[in-house]
Image (cartoon, helix red, strand yellow):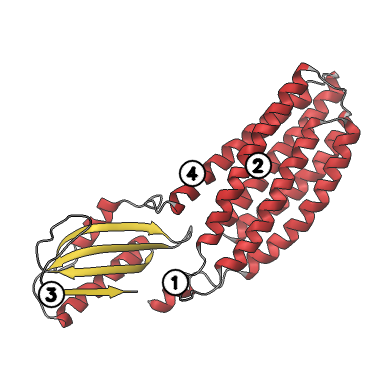
Amino acid sequence: MHAHAHGHDHGHGQQPARVLKISIFATLGYIVLLLAAGLRAHSLALISEAGHNVSDFLALLLSLAAVYIQTRPPSSTKTYGYQRAGVLVAFLNSGALVLLSFWIFYEAFERLQRPQPVVGELMAGVAAAGVVMNGAIAWMLWRSGRDVNLRSAFMHMLGDTLSTAAVIAGGAAIIATGRHWIDPAISVGIGAVVLWSSLGILRETANILLEGTPRGMDLDGIAGVLRTVEGVQDVHDLHVWSLGSESHALSCHITIADIPPSASERILREVKDRLLHSFHIHHTTIQFEHLVCDVAHGCVVPVGAEEQRMQ
């Protein structure tokens, strides 16, 4: 079980790292194209797309750093390893995106008051290249991992693909109607997509960093499952938190009868087994006691046999 717990995060580094490197170079090239085309076409939608892509570029760069950092093994000072590195990166990256979306809103409202002539053909052509590139990157990221760090990069790219598709539609509409306010109006839509996707990741990563109960975990449900283990009388002082986005830890006190350690070992094994198979919890700290526990500032047991097992 130990090997399972620690081998859990290590094999995933190579594939995401390669995908992220390809994505970083492609995004950098596209940023240069967007800026040049946006300035030539006088299109705020293209320039805000360039801003969006700069944040993507930083996000991908940070995600790549996090992939390498979070696969480093635990040390005596970082006993859980660096699994939170990716979470921290996703948190900072989402915060930067929220700020970017407000900048896009501000610029768009300025432009709506004073529309500028936009070259619709150039706008649509550059955006079409972007949809292909961002779509391909989003697909590669989606296939390469589910952790929150890669998911934040994937959400970025998905948001980009959608907003770039909107820029194509806007370019076509400007060609058809000659209405130049369409360009800042699309920018507002891009800003809204950026804001919505980043707030979701911001909420999830903040919960992990604040040691919140992981999404989808129900403490009462976990305690209920543990109480069904033969020999477990009660479960209390139960805490569940996330180490990284995909690995969770648990600590709890379990009341059992006054039995020899050899008998309690069976209970401990079964408890760990249930936690692993029902909830995918690998890291456990379980404290056994056979006295009524005085709960005051956590759990204080003045006398009595205790067995503490840490993993």
Few, some or many residues within 10 Å of mark 2 (<14, 14–19, 20+):
many
Q: Are marks 3 and 2 in contact (CB under 8 Å)?
A: no
Check residue 79 in the rendering and tell me which mark sits there, or answer none. Answer: 1
Mark earlier in primary sequence (3, 2)? 2
Compared with 263, 203 (above or below) is: above
Toward which corner of the image does residue 50 lie, by quadrant?
A: top right
Q: Which residue is mark 4?
A: 203
| Residue at x 62%, y 68% (from the top left corner) | 68
Q: Which residue is mark 2?
A: 159
Compared with 115, 264 (above or below) is: below
| Residue at x 47%, y 60% (from the top left corner) | 246
Q: Which residue is mark 3?
A: 305
Report the amino acid beneath label 1.
Thr
What SS does tag 3 mark? loop
Q: CA distance from mark 4 to mark 2?
A: 18 Å
Mark earlier in primary sequence (1, 2)? 1
Q: Are marks 3 and 1 in contact (CB under 8 Å)?
A: no
What SS does tag 1 mark? loop
Residue sitting at the far top: 113
Foreground: 185 or 270? 185
Mark earlier in primary sequence (4, 2)? 2
Few, some or many residues within 10 Å of mark 1 (<14, 14–19, 20+):
few
| Residue at x 65%, y 32% (from the top left corner) | 102
Report the amino acid beneath label 2.
Gly
Q: CA distance from mark 1 to mark 2?
A: 36 Å
Does the rendering let one see residue 146? no
